[in-house]
Image (cartoon, rainbow, N blue to C red):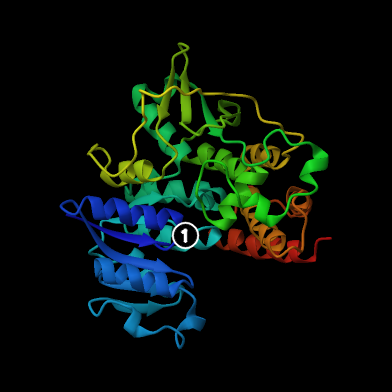
């Protein structure tokens, strides 16, 4: 029985993960769940699964949360230290890192330090501290398995050859809701428009990132560190149907792709059961129905965030922490109607270009740069 802690269990990744766990009760046991502020949803999850621990990471809610909302079998913890406690729980085998943004870094770090299998959907963890995280995983022998559909696809396709035989990996992108829009049309984008993704049901922050293509920019950085690639081995292609989740091209010209409907249960389940494959709740492709698969190059001019990803991956150092923090803060301002859609990548560019670059930062350095970038975005006009 695999005992699992799900960090960020009330988000899109977390709720899909709990559905996978529920579908495989003979193999998986939910040990811990965490949320930042959505304690009512967290309480509902504990009544469904009766985990040992539940964490509300916002300590300000300690005197707001109703204990009656939670299963009597579940112990309630508060604050970021609660996340660290469940991530390092000796009885947990696997930690699913589903917390959005840089906030997910510490939980994943503690889990890797403890040598646990980490299934991470939090791409920001590797964007901010990719070299440090992968080095830690190698030192402790902790498996680091991607849950993002694109990186899961690459992870699966890489099994078809040796690393020295890889020519390049190609990340697919839906193109978001504004694929093909003109510059003038993009000037009119509102938060409500950007949140309406055509193929994926995601959280607010990730939906905005998909609309700007910053999501794909961060995935470029993640792929570099996770798969130990050179930047010229990574490309992006727009694929509106979101059925081909990415592919690997080998030196002989063979291209291996992973296909499935746009649903996160499959990559989550694969990460949890790896290296085994078992039947699960994921939807299947209907091969009796006619459908088309389209591919086109991305538009770097209309979606300049993507270029920032390639530049950040090429430079490394503190760039990932700064870009990620600047983007998180800029998205918050956009959702508050305090920044325009097109200003998100502009603000990120300005803060990234102005920061003091360090090629070999420590974790403390990265946390400091993260805080500075957020403050700069607050002042950006």
Q: Quadrant of residue 114?
A: bottom left
Q: Which residue is labeled 1 in the image?
A: 99
Viewport quadrant of the N terminus: bottom left
- Residue extending farthest to the front is 289
Judge whether 289 appears above or below 218 on screen: above
Judge whether 307 appears above or below 351 on screen: above
Q: Left of 310 or right of it: where is 225?
A: left
Query: Looking at the picture, how far across and down is residue 117, in whole percent?
Result: 31, 51
- Residue extending farthest to the bottom is 63
Q: Residues within 10 Å of mark 1 (few under 14, many from 20)?
A: many
**107, 186: nearer the viewer:** 186
Q: Quadrant of residue 43?
A: bottom left
Please report the residue visible at 38 percent of the width from the left and 73 percent of the height from the top.
55
Query: Looking at the picture, how far across and down is residue 247, in whole percent?
Result: 47, 26
Residue 75 visible here: yes
Q: Left of 193 or right of it: where is 62?
A: left
Viewport quadrant of the C terminus: bottom right
Please report the residue visible at 53 percent of the width from the left and 42 percent of the height from the top.
222
**182, 129: nearer the viewer:** 182
Please report the residue visible at 46 percent of the width from the left and 31 percent of the height from the top.
243
Q: Left of 18 or right of it: where is 351?
A: right
**314, 329: nearer the viewer:** 329
**150, 91: nearer the viewer:** 150
Judge whether 75 appears above or below 139 on screen: below
- Count the numbered circles shown: 1
- Residue extending farthest to the top is 252
Residue 116 visible here: no
Query: Looking at the picture, how far across and down is residue 28, in whole percent?
Result: 21, 54
Query: Looking at the picture, how far across and down is residue 81, in whole percent?
Result: 42, 74
Judge whether 110 appears above or below 348 on screen: below
Label 1: state its secondary structure: loop
Q: Quadrant of residue 276?
A: top left
């Amino acid at each position: 029985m695999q005992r699992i802690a799900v960090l960020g269990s009330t988000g899109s990744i977390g709720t899909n993960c709990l559905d996978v766990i529920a579908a495989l009760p003979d193999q998986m046991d939910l040990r811990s769940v965490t949320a930042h502020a959505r304690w009512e949803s967290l309480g509902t999850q504990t009544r469904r699964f009766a985990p040992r621990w539940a964490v509300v990471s916002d300590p300000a809610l300690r005197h707001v949360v109703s204990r009656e909302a939670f299963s009597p079998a579940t112990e309630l913890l508060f604050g970021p230290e609660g996340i660290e406690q469940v991530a390092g729980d000796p009885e947990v085998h696997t930690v699913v890192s589903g917390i959005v943004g840089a906030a997910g870094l510490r939980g994943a770090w503690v889990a890797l330090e403890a040598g646990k299998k980490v299934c991470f959907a939090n791409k920001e963890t590797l964007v901010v501290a990719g070299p440090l995280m992968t080095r830690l995983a190698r030192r402790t022998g902790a498996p680091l398995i991607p849950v993002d559909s694109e990186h899961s696809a690459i992870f699966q396709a890489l099994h078809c050859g040796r690393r020295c035989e890889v020519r390049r990996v190609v990340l697919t992108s839906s193109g978001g809701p504004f694929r093909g829009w003109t510059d003038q049309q993009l000037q009119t984008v509102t938060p409500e428009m950007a949140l309406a993704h055509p193929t994926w049901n995601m959280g607010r922050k990730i939906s905005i990132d998909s609309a700007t293509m910053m999501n794909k920019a961060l995935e470029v950085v993640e792929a570099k560190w996770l798969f130990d690639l050179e930047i010229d081995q990574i490309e992006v292609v727009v694929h509106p149907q979101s059925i081909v989740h990415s592919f690997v091209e080998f030196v002989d010209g063979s291209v291996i792709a992973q296909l499935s409907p746009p649903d996160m249960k499959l990559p989550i389940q694969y990460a949890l059961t790896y290296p085994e494959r078992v039947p699960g709740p994921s939807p299947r492709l209907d091969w009796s129905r006619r459908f088309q698969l389209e591919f086109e190059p991305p538009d770097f001019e209309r979606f300049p965030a993507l270029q920032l990803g390639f530049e950040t991956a090429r430079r490394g150092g503190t760039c990932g922490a700064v870009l990620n923090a600047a983007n998180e803060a800029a998205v918050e301002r956009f959702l508050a109607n305090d920044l325009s859609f097109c200003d998100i990548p502009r603000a990120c560019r300005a803060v990234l270009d102005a920061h003091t670059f360090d090629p070999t930062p420590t974790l403390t350095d990265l946390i400091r740069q993260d805080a500075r970038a957020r403050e700069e975005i607050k002042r950006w006009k």
